[in-house]
Amino acid sequence: MRGVTDADDIPLLDELMPWSVAPLRFGRAWVVAPDARTLRRRWDRLVAAEGGERETLFRPSRARTTGTAVAALPGQRTGTGRFARESGPCPEPVRVLAGPFDEQWLLPDHRLIDTARPELWRVAGDPQLFAVEQGQVPGAAGPALLVCGALPEGRSPAGRPGRIRPLFRRPGGAEPNLAPGLAGFLRERYGSADPYRWLAWTVAAAVPSPAGCRVPLPAGPAVWAAGVACGRELLDVQLRGALTGARPRLPGGRRPYVRAAIPPRPESLSYDSEGEVLSVGEGRISPVPEAAWEYRVGGVRVLEQWFARRTAPAEPGTLEAIGPSAWPQEWTSELLELVTVLALLGAREAERAPFTAGGGPSRSALRAAGVLPVPDRARRPASVFDHQEEGPEGQFMLV
Protein backbone atom coordinates (compact mmCIF):
# COMPACT_ATOMS: atom_id res chain seq x y z
CA MET A 1 0.00 0.00 0.00
CA ARG A 2 1.31 3.42 -0.95
CA GLY A 3 2.28 5.59 2.04
CA VAL A 4 1.51 9.24 2.68
CA THR A 5 3.41 11.75 0.55
CA ASP A 6 1.29 14.84 1.22
CA ALA A 7 1.13 16.22 4.78
CA ASP A 8 -2.52 17.10 4.26
CA ASP A 9 -3.25 13.42 3.62
CA ILE A 10 -2.06 12.37 7.09
CA PRO A 11 -5.18 11.43 9.11
CA LEU A 12 -6.48 13.98 11.59
CA LEU A 13 -7.16 12.92 15.16
CA ASP A 14 -10.53 14.61 14.69
CA GLU A 15 -11.36 11.90 12.14
CA LEU A 16 -9.98 8.98 14.13
CA MET A 17 -11.36 9.91 17.59
CA PRO A 18 -14.43 11.78 16.34
CA TRP A 19 -16.26 12.65 19.58
CA SER A 20 -14.65 15.68 21.14
CA VAL A 21 -15.65 18.37 23.60
CA ALA A 22 -14.47 21.97 23.85
CA PRO A 23 -12.51 23.05 26.93
CA LEU A 24 -14.28 23.78 30.20
CA ARG A 25 -14.77 27.40 31.22
CA PHE A 26 -14.77 27.83 34.99
CA GLY A 27 -15.76 31.50 34.86
CA ARG A 28 -14.29 32.33 38.28
CA ALA A 29 -10.80 31.53 39.51
CA TRP A 30 -11.75 30.82 43.13
CA VAL A 31 -13.52 27.52 42.33
CA VAL A 32 -10.10 25.92 41.61
CA ALA A 33 -7.15 25.65 43.99
CA PRO A 34 -3.98 23.56 44.38
CA ASP A 35 -5.27 22.19 47.73
CA ALA A 36 -8.72 21.09 48.90
CA ARG A 37 -8.47 22.90 52.26
CA THR A 38 -8.42 26.24 50.49
CA LEU A 39 -11.62 25.44 48.61
CA ARG A 40 -13.42 24.52 51.83
CA ARG A 41 -12.35 27.80 53.42
CA ARG A 42 -13.55 29.76 50.37
CA TRP A 43 -16.91 27.98 50.42
CA ASP A 44 -17.41 28.68 54.12
CA ARG A 45 -16.57 32.34 53.58
CA LEU A 46 -19.03 32.59 50.70
CA VAL A 47 -22.01 30.93 52.42
CA ALA A 48 -21.39 33.04 55.54
CA ALA A 49 -21.88 36.18 53.44
CA GLU A 50 -25.32 37.57 52.71
CA GLY A 51 -27.04 39.75 50.15
CA GLY A 52 -24.81 42.01 48.11
CA GLU A 53 -21.60 40.78 49.76
CA ARG A 54 -22.33 37.21 48.66
CA GLU A 55 -22.99 38.37 45.11
CA THR A 56 -19.73 40.35 45.05
CA LEU A 57 -17.66 37.47 46.40
CA PHE A 58 -19.33 35.08 43.98
CA ARG A 59 -18.04 37.04 40.95
CA PRO A 60 -21.18 36.85 38.77
CA SER A 61 -20.92 36.40 35.01
CA ARG A 62 -23.39 36.25 32.14
CA ALA A 63 -23.66 32.50 32.65
CA ARG A 64 -23.79 32.33 36.46
CA THR A 65 -25.05 34.52 39.28
CA THR A 66 -26.24 33.63 42.77
CA GLY A 67 -29.73 33.49 41.28
CA THR A 68 -28.94 30.89 38.61
CA ALA A 69 -30.62 27.47 38.93
CA VAL A 70 -29.02 24.61 37.01
CA ALA A 71 -28.87 20.81 37.04
CA ALA A 72 -26.36 19.00 39.22
CA LEU A 73 -23.26 17.69 37.49
CA PRO A 74 -23.43 13.97 36.72
CA GLY A 75 -22.20 11.91 39.66
CA GLN A 76 -22.11 14.87 42.06
CA ARG A 77 -24.31 15.44 45.10
CA THR A 78 -24.64 19.21 45.15
CA GLY A 79 -27.51 21.64 45.47
CA THR A 80 -29.56 22.66 42.47
CA GLY A 81 -31.43 25.57 44.06
CA ARG A 82 -30.28 29.13 43.64
CA PHE A 83 -26.96 29.79 45.35
CA ALA A 84 -28.38 32.90 47.00
CA ARG A 85 -30.19 30.49 49.37
CA GLU A 86 -27.23 28.08 49.88
CA SER A 87 -26.23 27.42 53.49
CA GLY A 88 -25.05 23.82 53.40
CA PRO A 89 -21.59 22.25 53.79
CA CYS A 90 -18.89 22.40 51.15
CA PRO A 91 -19.19 19.71 48.46
CA GLU A 92 -16.27 17.30 48.29
CA PRO A 93 -13.61 18.79 45.98
CA VAL A 94 -12.59 16.67 43.00
CA ARG A 95 -9.24 16.35 41.27
CA VAL A 96 -8.97 18.08 37.88
CA LEU A 97 -6.20 18.91 35.45
CA ALA A 98 -6.20 22.71 35.57
CA GLY A 99 -3.35 22.98 33.04
CA PRO A 100 -0.72 20.77 31.43
CA PHE A 101 0.63 18.45 34.17
CA ASP A 102 -1.03 20.66 36.80
CA GLU A 103 -3.41 18.65 38.99
CA GLN A 104 -5.52 20.85 41.23
CA TRP A 105 -8.90 20.66 43.01
CA LEU A 106 -12.31 21.91 41.90
CA LEU A 107 -15.60 22.60 43.66
CA PRO A 108 -17.88 20.34 41.55
CA ASP A 109 -20.97 22.53 41.89
CA HIS A 110 -22.61 23.32 38.57
CA ARG A 111 -23.95 26.63 39.95
CA LEU A 112 -20.36 27.88 40.25
CA ILE A 113 -19.02 26.87 36.82
CA ASP A 114 -19.87 28.79 33.66
CA THR A 115 -19.38 25.90 31.22
CA ALA A 116 -18.78 22.56 32.94
CA ARG A 117 -19.36 20.20 29.95
CA PRO A 118 -21.68 17.69 31.74
CA GLU A 119 -21.16 15.18 28.91
CA LEU A 120 -17.56 14.76 30.11
CA TRP A 121 -18.57 14.30 33.76
CA ARG A 122 -21.02 11.63 32.61
CA VAL A 123 -18.23 9.41 31.27
CA ALA A 124 -15.46 10.30 33.76
CA GLY A 125 -13.98 7.74 36.17
CA ASP A 126 -11.99 4.52 35.76
CA PRO A 127 -11.05 3.33 33.21
CA GLN A 128 -11.64 6.55 31.27
CA LEU A 129 -8.71 8.52 29.90
CA PHE A 130 -8.86 11.92 28.20
CA ALA A 131 -6.70 12.88 25.22
CA VAL A 132 -6.27 16.66 25.32
CA GLU A 133 -5.40 18.07 21.91
CA GLN A 134 -3.22 21.17 22.13
CA GLY A 135 -3.88 24.09 19.82
CA GLN A 136 -0.94 24.69 17.52
CA VAL A 137 1.33 27.65 18.19
CA PRO A 138 3.51 28.26 15.10
CA GLY A 139 7.18 27.81 15.89
CA ALA A 140 6.53 26.82 19.53
CA ALA A 141 7.87 23.65 21.08
CA GLY A 142 5.62 21.19 22.84
CA PRO A 143 3.56 18.03 22.39
CA ALA A 144 0.47 17.97 20.19
CA LEU A 145 -1.37 15.67 22.59
CA LEU A 146 -1.47 15.10 26.35
CA VAL A 147 -3.37 12.37 28.21
CA CYS A 148 -4.81 12.41 31.72
CA GLY A 149 -7.15 10.43 33.93
CA ALA A 150 -8.52 13.40 35.87
CA LEU A 151 -11.12 15.58 34.21
CA PRO A 152 -9.15 18.20 32.21
CA GLU A 153 -9.97 21.87 31.86
CA GLY A 154 -8.49 21.47 28.39
CA ARG A 155 -7.25 25.00 27.75
CA SER A 156 -3.89 25.57 26.09
CA PRO A 157 -1.42 27.61 28.18
CA ALA A 158 -0.91 29.77 25.10
CA GLY A 159 -4.63 30.45 24.84
CA ARG A 160 -5.08 28.49 21.62
CA PRO A 161 -8.25 26.42 21.21
CA GLY A 162 -7.95 22.68 21.68
CA ARG A 163 -10.27 19.70 22.10
CA ILE A 164 -10.85 17.05 24.76
CA ARG A 165 -11.32 13.52 23.38
CA PRO A 166 -12.47 10.82 25.82
CA LEU A 167 -11.13 7.36 25.04
CA PHE A 168 -14.58 5.86 25.70
CA ARG A 169 -18.02 7.17 24.81
CA ARG A 170 -19.85 5.56 27.73
CA PRO A 171 -19.14 5.03 31.45
CA GLY A 172 -17.19 1.96 32.51
CA GLY A 173 -14.95 1.81 29.45
CA ALA A 174 -17.77 0.98 27.04
CA GLU A 175 -17.79 1.92 23.34
CA PRO A 176 -14.34 3.20 22.34
CA ASN A 177 -14.28 6.68 20.84
CA LEU A 178 -12.88 5.48 17.52
CA ALA A 179 -14.13 6.04 14.01
CA PRO A 180 -16.43 3.15 13.03
CA GLY A 181 -14.32 0.55 11.24
CA LEU A 182 -10.98 1.95 12.44
CA ALA A 183 -10.30 -0.84 14.95
CA GLY A 184 -10.84 -3.50 12.27
CA PHE A 185 -8.72 -1.57 9.78
CA LEU A 186 -5.83 -1.38 12.25
CA ARG A 187 -6.21 -4.99 13.36
CA GLU A 188 -6.03 -6.22 9.78
CA ARG A 189 -2.80 -4.33 9.12
CA TYR A 190 -1.01 -4.45 12.45
CA GLY A 191 -2.46 -7.44 14.28
CA SER A 192 -3.65 -5.62 17.42
CA ALA A 193 -5.77 -2.54 17.92
CA ASP A 194 -7.52 -2.27 21.29
CA PRO A 195 -8.29 1.29 22.51
CA TYR A 196 -5.26 1.49 24.81
CA ARG A 197 -2.84 0.42 22.08
CA TRP A 198 -4.40 3.01 19.82
CA LEU A 199 -3.98 5.73 22.46
CA ALA A 200 -0.36 4.70 23.04
CA TRP A 201 0.31 4.99 19.31
CA THR A 202 -1.20 8.48 19.18
CA VAL A 203 1.00 9.63 22.09
CA ALA A 204 4.07 8.39 20.20
CA ALA A 205 3.11 9.63 16.74
CA ALA A 206 0.88 12.72 17.03
CA VAL A 207 2.12 15.91 15.37
CA PRO A 208 0.59 19.41 15.33
CA SER A 209 -0.72 21.08 12.19
CA PRO A 210 -2.79 24.16 11.34
CA ALA A 211 -5.77 21.86 10.71
CA GLY A 212 -5.41 20.12 14.07
CA CYS A 213 -3.49 17.22 15.53
CA ARG A 214 -2.47 14.65 12.90
CA VAL A 215 -1.67 10.99 13.57
CA PRO A 216 0.58 9.36 10.95
CA LEU A 217 -0.01 5.62 10.59
CA PRO A 218 2.95 3.21 10.24
CA ALA A 219 3.96 1.19 7.22
CA GLY A 220 3.83 -2.19 8.97
CA PRO A 221 3.31 -4.22 12.16
CA ALA A 222 6.90 -3.90 13.41
CA VAL A 223 6.77 -0.09 13.49
CA TRP A 224 3.29 -0.21 15.02
CA ALA A 225 4.49 -2.50 17.82
CA ALA A 226 7.53 -0.32 18.51
CA GLY A 227 5.43 2.83 18.53
CA VAL A 228 2.84 1.31 20.85
CA ALA A 229 5.61 0.23 23.25
CA CYS A 230 7.18 3.71 23.21
CA GLY A 231 3.82 5.42 23.56
CA ARG A 232 2.79 3.19 26.44
CA GLU A 233 5.92 4.17 28.39
CA LEU A 234 5.34 7.86 27.67
CA LEU A 235 1.69 7.45 28.59
CA ASP A 236 2.57 5.81 31.90
CA VAL A 237 4.84 8.76 32.75
CA GLN A 238 2.10 11.27 31.88
CA LEU A 239 -0.32 9.30 34.09
CA ARG A 240 2.18 9.22 36.99
CA GLY A 241 2.57 5.43 36.85
CA ALA A 242 -1.13 4.55 36.67
CA LEU A 243 -0.54 1.86 34.04
CA THR A 244 2.31 0.04 35.77
CA GLY A 245 1.62 0.92 39.40
CA ALA A 246 5.13 2.40 39.79
CA ARG A 247 5.55 6.14 40.24
CA PRO A 248 7.96 7.72 37.72
CA ARG A 249 11.56 7.85 38.93
CA LEU A 250 14.83 9.07 37.54
CA PRO A 251 17.93 6.90 38.08
CA GLY A 252 19.22 6.98 41.67
CA GLY A 253 21.97 9.50 41.15
CA ARG A 254 19.70 11.78 39.12
CA ARG A 255 16.71 12.04 41.44
CA PRO A 256 15.94 15.65 42.42
CA TYR A 257 16.20 16.54 46.11
CA VAL A 258 15.61 19.66 48.18
CA ARG A 259 19.08 21.04 48.96
CA ALA A 260 17.86 24.21 50.68
CA ALA A 261 14.38 24.59 52.16
CA ILE A 262 11.79 26.49 50.16
CA PRO A 263 10.82 29.66 52.08
CA PRO A 264 7.25 30.30 53.28
CA ARG A 265 6.51 32.71 50.44
CA PRO A 266 8.84 32.22 47.45
CA GLU A 267 8.49 35.01 44.91
CA SER A 268 10.63 33.78 42.04
CA LEU A 269 11.58 30.67 40.10
CA SER A 270 14.85 30.42 38.20
CA TYR A 271 17.19 27.81 36.78
CA ASP A 272 20.96 27.37 36.62
CA SER A 273 21.73 25.02 33.76
CA GLU A 274 25.40 24.64 34.68
CA GLY A 275 24.66 23.43 38.20
CA GLU A 276 21.27 21.89 37.30
CA VAL A 277 19.71 23.85 40.17
CA LEU A 278 16.11 24.99 40.33
CA SER A 279 15.80 27.98 42.68
CA VAL A 280 12.42 28.44 44.33
CA GLY A 281 12.92 31.74 46.09
CA GLU A 282 15.86 30.98 48.36
CA GLY A 283 15.11 27.26 48.18
CA ARG A 284 17.20 24.95 46.02
CA ILE A 285 16.28 21.73 44.23
CA SER A 286 18.85 19.65 42.34
CA PRO A 287 19.74 17.89 40.18
CA VAL A 288 17.08 19.18 37.80
CA PRO A 289 17.82 18.12 34.20
CA GLU A 290 17.62 20.90 31.65
CA ALA A 291 15.02 18.83 29.79
CA ALA A 292 12.63 19.37 32.71
CA TRP A 293 13.18 23.14 32.84
CA GLU A 294 12.84 23.54 29.07
CA TYR A 295 9.77 21.31 28.72
CA ARG A 296 7.05 23.42 27.16
CA VAL A 297 3.44 23.03 26.11
CA GLY A 298 2.15 25.53 23.58
CA GLY A 299 5.48 27.32 23.85
CA VAL A 300 5.04 27.94 27.61
CA ARG A 301 7.42 26.46 30.21
CA VAL A 302 5.40 24.03 32.31
CA LEU A 303 7.43 24.62 35.50
CA GLU A 304 7.06 28.39 35.28
CA GLN A 305 3.32 28.18 34.75
CA TRP A 306 2.91 25.66 37.59
CA PHE A 307 4.77 27.97 39.97
CA ALA A 308 2.91 31.11 38.84
CA ARG A 309 -0.46 29.53 39.49
CA ARG A 310 0.52 28.96 43.12
CA THR A 311 2.19 32.28 43.85
CA ALA A 312 0.44 34.93 41.74
CA PRO A 313 -0.93 37.71 43.98
CA ALA A 314 -4.71 37.98 44.35
CA GLU A 315 -6.87 41.02 44.99
CA PRO A 316 -7.31 41.49 48.75
CA GLY A 317 -10.79 40.74 50.04
CA THR A 318 -11.66 38.32 47.24
CA LEU A 319 -12.15 34.59 47.56
CA GLU A 320 -9.06 34.10 45.39
CA ALA A 321 -7.04 35.74 48.16
CA ILE A 322 -7.92 32.91 50.54
CA GLY A 323 -5.11 30.37 50.39
CA PRO A 324 -2.28 28.78 52.37
CA SER A 325 -0.44 31.16 54.67
CA ALA A 326 2.85 29.49 53.72
CA TRP A 327 4.19 27.16 51.03
CA PRO A 328 2.77 23.70 51.94
CA GLN A 329 5.03 20.66 52.13
CA GLU A 330 2.80 18.81 49.67
CA TRP A 331 3.57 21.42 47.01
CA THR A 332 7.25 20.59 47.35
CA SER A 333 6.49 16.90 46.87
CA GLU A 334 4.36 17.68 43.83
CA LEU A 335 7.10 19.86 42.39
CA LEU A 336 9.70 17.10 42.78
CA GLU A 337 7.40 14.67 41.00
CA LEU A 338 6.66 17.19 38.26
CA VAL A 339 10.39 17.69 37.65
CA THR A 340 10.75 13.93 37.34
CA VAL A 341 7.85 13.62 34.89
CA LEU A 342 9.05 16.45 32.67
CA ALA A 343 12.65 15.20 32.71
CA LEU A 344 11.58 11.71 31.64
CA LEU A 345 9.32 13.00 28.87
CA GLY A 346 11.83 15.55 27.61
CA ALA A 347 14.66 13.03 27.50
CA ARG A 348 12.61 10.66 25.34
CA GLU A 349 11.14 13.17 22.92
CA ALA A 350 13.65 12.27 20.21
CA GLU A 351 12.51 8.63 20.32
CA ARG A 352 9.19 9.65 18.76
CA ALA A 353 10.78 10.65 15.44
CA PRO A 354 10.45 7.26 13.66
CA PHE A 355 6.72 7.17 14.43
CA THR A 356 5.89 10.76 13.49
CA ALA A 357 7.39 10.09 10.05
CA GLY A 358 4.44 7.91 9.10
CA GLY A 359 4.80 6.13 5.76
CA GLY A 360 1.62 4.09 6.15
CA PRO A 361 -2.04 4.39 5.16
CA SER A 362 -3.28 7.87 4.31
CA ARG A 363 -6.65 9.56 4.61
CA SER A 364 -7.25 8.44 1.04
CA ALA A 365 -6.66 4.82 2.07
CA LEU A 366 -9.03 5.22 5.01
CA ARG A 367 -11.68 6.60 2.68
CA ALA A 368 -11.18 3.70 0.28
CA ALA A 369 -11.59 1.28 3.20
CA GLY A 370 -14.83 2.94 4.30
CA VAL A 371 -13.43 4.25 7.61
CA LEU A 372 -13.80 7.84 6.42
CA PRO A 373 -15.80 9.99 6.26
CA VAL A 374 -16.98 9.66 9.85
CA PRO A 375 -20.76 9.49 10.32
CA ASP A 376 -22.33 12.35 12.26
CA ARG A 377 -23.55 10.03 15.02
CA ALA A 378 -19.93 9.23 15.95
CA ARG A 379 -19.32 12.91 16.68
CA ARG A 380 -22.19 13.17 19.16
CA PRO A 381 -22.09 11.98 22.81
CA ALA A 382 -23.73 8.64 23.49
CA SER A 383 -27.14 8.73 25.18
CA VAL A 384 -27.52 7.16 28.63
CA PHE A 385 -31.24 6.49 28.79
CA ASP A 386 -31.17 4.64 32.12
CA HIS A 387 -29.30 7.37 34.01
CA GLN A 388 -31.30 9.80 36.17
CA GLU A 389 -29.83 13.17 37.13
CA GLU A 390 -31.11 15.99 39.29
CA GLY A 391 -32.21 19.05 37.34
CA PRO A 392 -32.70 22.66 38.47
CA GLU A 393 -34.54 23.17 41.75
CA GLY A 394 -34.48 19.46 42.58
CA GLN A 395 -36.37 18.18 39.53
CA PHE A 396 -35.16 14.97 37.92
CA MET A 397 -34.45 14.22 34.30
CA LEU A 398 -33.40 11.27 32.18
CA VAL A 399 -30.45 11.57 29.84
Image (cartoon, helix red, strand yellow):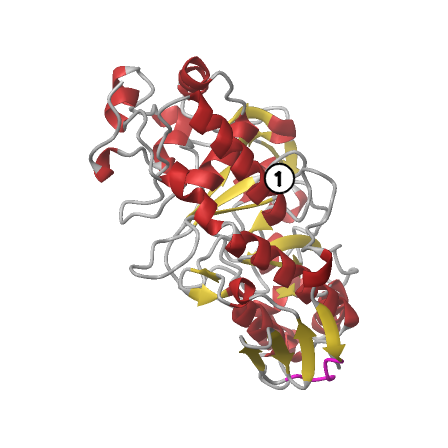
Q: Residue flagged by tag 1: what amino acid is it?
A: Ala
Q: Which residue: 61% across, 85% down?
A: 267
In-image side of 164 versus 208 (left or right): right
Q: Look at the image and tell me in which quarter the N terminus lies.
A: top left
In-image side of 368 versus 16 (left or right): left
Q: Look at the image and tell me in which quarter the C terminus lies.
A: top right
Residue 109 image offset from top left, x and y in percent: 65, 54
Residue 116 image offset from top left, x and y in percent: 54, 51
Q: Confirm whether the magenta stretch covers residue 88.
A: no
Label 1 Cα crowd, 10 Å radius (few <14 / some 14-19 / many 20+): many
Q: Which residue: 33% across, 38% down?
A: 357
Q: Is residue 16 visible?
A: yes
Dominant SS of magenta comes to: loop
Quarter of the image for residue 38 reads: bottom right
Residue 61 image offset from top left, x and y in percent: 48, 66
In-image side of 126 versus 113 (left or right): right
Magenta-highlighted residues: 261-266
Q: Which residue: 74% across, 56% down?
A: 91
Quarter of the image for residue 140 reads: bottom left
Q: Classify mark 1: helix, strand or loop.
A: loop
Q: How many marks?
A: 1
What residue sits right under mark 1 in the picture?
A: 124
Q: Which residue: 74% across, 44% down?
A: 246
